[in-house]
Image (tube, rainbow, N blue to C red):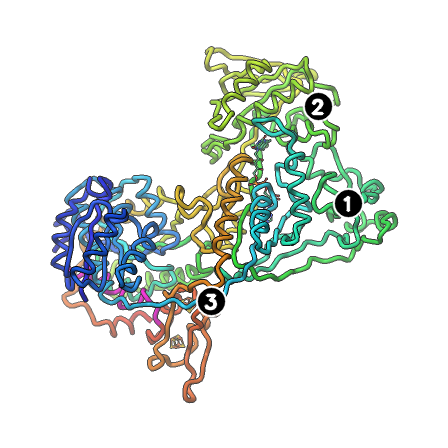
Amino acid sequence: MRIGVFICHCGSNIAGTVDCAAVAAKAATYPDVAYATDIMYACAEPGQDAIIAAIKEHQLSGVVVASCTPRMHEPTFRKTVERAGLNRYMFEMANIREHVSWIGKDIEANTNKAAELVRMAAAKLRLNKELKPKSFPVTKRLLVVGGGVAGIQAALDAADAGLEVILVEKQPTIGGKMAKLDKTFPTVDCSSCILGPRMVDVAQHPNITLYAYSEVESVSGYVGNFDVKIRKKASYVDWVKCTGCGLCTEKCPARKSYDRFNEGVGPTTAIIIPFPQAIPKKASIEREHCRLLTGGKCGVCAKVCPTGAINYAMEDEIIEARVGGIVAATGYDLIDWKIYEEYGGGRYPDVVTSLQYERMLSASGPTGGHIKRPSDGVEPKDVVFIQCVGSRDPSIGRPYCSGFCCMYTAKQAILTKDHIPDSQSYVFYMDIRSPGKGYDEFTRRVQEEYKARYIRGRVSLVYPKGNKLIVRGADTLMGVQVEVEADLVVLAVGAEAASESAKLAEKLRISYDSYGFFMEGHPKLKPVETNTAGVFLAGACQGLKDIPSSVAQGSAAAAKAIGLLSRDMLDSDPQIAFVSANRCVGCGKCIEVCPFKAIQEIDLRGQPKAEVIETVCQGCGLCNATCPQGAIQLSHFTDNQILAEVEALCRF
Amino acid sequence: MSVLNTKELRIIGFLCNWCSYGGADTAGVGRFTQPTDLRVVRVPCSGRINPLFILKSLLGGADGVLVSGCHPRDCHYAEGNFYARRRLELLKGFLPVLGIDPRRFEYTWVSASEGQRWQHVVEAFTAQIHGLGPARGWPEAPELEILNAVAR
Ligand SMILES: Cc1cc2nc3c(=O)[nH]c(=O)nc-3n(C[C@H](O)[C@H](O)[C@H](O)COP(=O)(O)OP(=O)(O)OC[C@H]3O[C@@H](n4cnc5c(N)ncnc54)[C@H](O)[C@@H]3O)c2cc1C
Ligand code: SF4
Ligand code: SF4
């Protein structure tokens, strides 16, 4: 073999702490290395051209590039060597940036380490084989999980591009948090007026199948062909028959049920249609509140339903579907703010969350858009907003900024003035974060035009006094203690990933961070991809963001999915297992361990042997480490290749 | 001998591509400074790691071997890391039989987002190996076949 080695400077990223020329000189002495050089930017066009030219000039049959992580540019350089006529797998990378130059400043140690990493890569490359992908057909159907504004956008864009879309939403209606909002910043336009029509589009789109009140049960398979099971939860109402007339919700006697859609502002019935514009506009019974389903006597809804849609015996249903790609758009939830004893820990009815306040502002909410104190129904005059409740607080393990609270607090202060002209709003804040188009102007307007009083400082205590709440805090700009007498306190509660996000991530085999937010493929360059091919992200599930950004990401995820599913065939990754029939003794151990059922037993002249189903194998190599004979080997990561790397280190 | 004399010891890491290799990358991107002894071998999954690789490393001259994969339940390939855990636990128990201090081998779980955790893991393990000092050399590393038999 004739190996070419290219040591990238990455400008000064590598060359700053690694002597690249010395590494190249060392590499030239390694077995089979025919050519070695250092290069300014290997990935840039001149760099790639230089690699191609060197392959031709020196008749290279394999290439090592020592640069950044292979998780970044392995695909780039594989294409480069392919353009020069080599098989794309006759290529190895040594990671001398993330694993060397960026983690230490000792040039001597770094240079030595870089040279050794190159030695390992070259040793492995000597055993590389040309690999060719197989192609397989793609299922042109997309699954979108989560029907908030991000998921809705992704579903509509993909459906408009001609893809079949399955939208799975956990709640009985789509719309997510945006459906709960009254108005939206920074234009203060009505949330349901802009979201409502999009929700209707989802219901009416011929390419979209909506499963509301459903969850993803399991996912198997791989990019191009995922097999998903969807659990349609029992709603106890036959949605084919239900016309959404709402008679049942008027007559249901269980009137003290928790109203999830309205965030518990006022009670609701056991059988509900979450809100007038719900999509689908169908009734469902919440089991834990239903008198009949919890063992009592009732059955009123069945009696009044004009279409006979009520079915108390309904059970969960499992629906199976095959899809080519998946968009996760499961959004966020507010953190449990009751851990903050200083704000009353939930004991004072007139301390409400920002989302509850949205429901109180909304004309379709339980108060009909009239702001009333939950304790006595009186209109408040002095309203105190406390920001960063559970955001930027390392003491509760939430060091991050929730991103949208500064803006929606400003919005809510404006709306308060609109609803109650003689009211006064006070906002306790840490910093005002408003970097968006028209955003900073908005947070100024609320102070200058709407005369909200912004107080920079934390609140140390909220306590009741008569029928008022005293909010005690610091004004750090004035350097004084302040106390405000409030009729109502609104907490801008911080957000975290939607409950059970981690469980979904595990089903989708994607990574998530310690807060449950899903990890994108690359923080800058792959913001909507994940490291699992065919799975994309949209909206707040990837990291908290406001509506404009969620919508943009929904479209971006759809564009990626459309790109993937516009192809009829995909290439399978040839880095898969293969069996040497003459070494295999047919013990079946590999068949037992393979998580993908990718190995089958075949009969070879009367003897049982293992055989890998090429398009099913995912290349984990579990079988390889299990086989007592070393008969099944993972291409590109064979025992000998890995041991060659070990030996390259141990021998020297 | 290209291990920097006396300064470094020979430490080999086997990292799964999806979680720990990513975590090490994240540490790099975050410029989390680490000791320079470790050399990383990238494998698709911790389940790919044959205990033989670790034995071969330790008998072949490595002073320490570190394995890191995805957190349990987080495996990119569903369950590879469960098998890995079982195998590696067995191996650790078996090392003294070969006269190898079991502290020369550790396995752990680091996710792709845990750059700082990776830094701590590398610092702690490197310190542990330096505490033990260079491994007693094996005059002749046993042949692959013998090791293979031992490893099963
Ligand atoms: C009080 C408040 C006011 C706000 N005001 C504004 C504003 O004025 N302007 C603005 O731009 N932004 C505002 N925001 C931010 C806005 O709510 C978010 O940007 C937006 O809702 C994010 O959309 P999403 O689709 O990513 O997530 P979500 O709206 O959270 O939607 C996620 C959807 O996925 C569903 N889901 C969750 N888990 C699963 C699962 N496992 N399976 C199936 N479905 C699942 C949920 O039920 C939900 O329907 C406000 C936020 C708050 C808290
Ligand atoms: S590498 Fe082996 S265990 Fe893994 S998917 Fe392929 S056949 Fe199954
Ligand atoms: S484990 Fe090895 S020997 Fe046993 S059936 Fe599989 S390939 Fe054949």
| Residue drawn at point x = 15 percent, y = 55 percent | A36
- Residue A472 placement (x, y as % from top left): 56, 17
The crowd level at tag 1 (other Cα within 10 Å; few <14, some 14-19, many 20+) is many
| Residue drawn at point x = 13 percent, y = 57 percent | A28
Residue A79 horizontal side relative to residue A282, left or right: left
Amino acid marked by disc 2? Ile
In-front residue for pair A330/A185:
A185
- Residue B48 placement (x, y as % from top left): 36, 63
Find disc 2 in the rendering and name its residue: A371
Q: Which residues are magenta?
A: A633-652
Q: Are dots 1 and 2 on a single chain?
A: yes
Q: Quadrant of the C terminus of chain B?
A: bottom left
Q: Are dots 1 and 3 on a single chain?
A: yes
Residue A649 appears in the figure: no
- Pointer 1 residue Cβ closer than 8 Å to ligand 1: no
Q: CA distance from mark 2 to mark 3?
A: 59 Å
Q: Dot 1: what SS?
A: strand
Q: Quadrant of ligand 2?
A: bottom left
| Residue drawn at point x = 77 percent, y = 37 percent | A256
- Mark before the other along the chain sequence, 2 or 3: 3
Find disc 3 in the rendering and name its residue: A136
Q: Main secondary structure of the magenta part?
A: helix
Do labels 2 and 3 touch, CB within 8 Å? Answer: no
Read off the chain for label 1. Answer: A
Q: Is residue A421 above or below residue B32?
A: above
- Mark before the other along the chain sequence, 1 or 3: 3
Amino acid marked by disc 1? Ile
